[in-house]
Image (cartoon, rainbow, N blue to C red):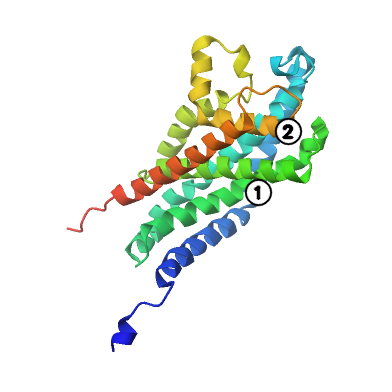
Amino acid sequence: MASQATSLPGASNTGLYLPAFTLWWREIVRFYRQRSRVIGVIASPLLFWAVIGSGFGTSFRSGQSAGQQHYLDYFYPGALIMIVLFTSIFTMMSVIEDRKEGFLLSVLVAPVPRSSIVLGKVLGGTTLSAIQGLIFLAFAPLVGVHLNLGQFLLVTLTIFLVSFALTALGFAIAWPMDSTQAFHAIINLFLIPLWLLSGALFPLAGASGWIRILMRINPLTYGVEALRNLLYPASPAEFPLSASMATLVLFSAFMFALAFLMVNRRTTKPAA
């Protein structure tokens, strides 16, 4: 009958969001069943923050705070971004694992849009990294940071945008790969310098000329600066908060578009 052939209202939306939700939930369950990953993601940056921050101690004074900011305070936003970076990127190793296990192939041949695959996987990694970042935010009072509701919501939004962009980037890197070793090699070559040149370890103002240029074109710099502006509003900022947030939105949109493009470009060889 003609009435039976007619698509139900919202059916296309269901076909997009239900698979995406399923993949999102799978990422959440998979991560928190591996307790060692949860502990490692939090403990490593916390140890890094405490050791490096205490090691530099009062020998470092950021120019942004007129010589008054302890390095442990200055480094806190960078340590928070480190948690988001590592969680976002390494969560996307599940793409390679899913391909090896055959799960990804079963998803690709299912009658679901590929955009739902990208959306589900990226939102899953984003949720995990954002939660880990917010957990680390509990240590903010130790560096004298006390947020009101408005600041907390803006910090949460910043963490979400950085998480979303980096997860989409991790997805785009992992999608064409068949080896976790190759994935690690790319991470060490590309993403660690991305974090080092984000203003996490040293301020942009004190960097040399060519380093300053790299830091200005590094989108992660704007995430670190946005967090620093929100956590330490009394300190002078390299960029206005609005400019940093706008850059993060554009970075997130670009990375998601890149991940979507990678999914649609990949083809499998026909069986002989």
Quadrant location of the C terminus?
A: bottom left
At 43% across and 64% down in the image, what residue appears?
16
At 73% across and 33% down in the image, what residue appears?
231
**Is residue 219 in view?**
yes
Q: Which residue is disc 2 drawn over? A: 231
176 lies left or right of 243: left
150 lies left or right of 21: right
Residue type at the position of mark 1: Ile
Numbered disc in front, either 1 or 2: 2
Q: Nearer the viewer, residue 104 or 152?
A: 152
**Is residue 179 in view?**
no
Q: Secondary structure at mark 1?
A: helix
Q: Which residue is disc 1 drawn over? A: 131
Give the Cα separation between the discs numbered 1 and 2: 18 Å
Vertical comparison of 15 with 54: above or below: below
Quadrant location of the N terminus?
A: bottom left
Q: Earlier in the sequence, mark 1 or mark 2?
A: 1
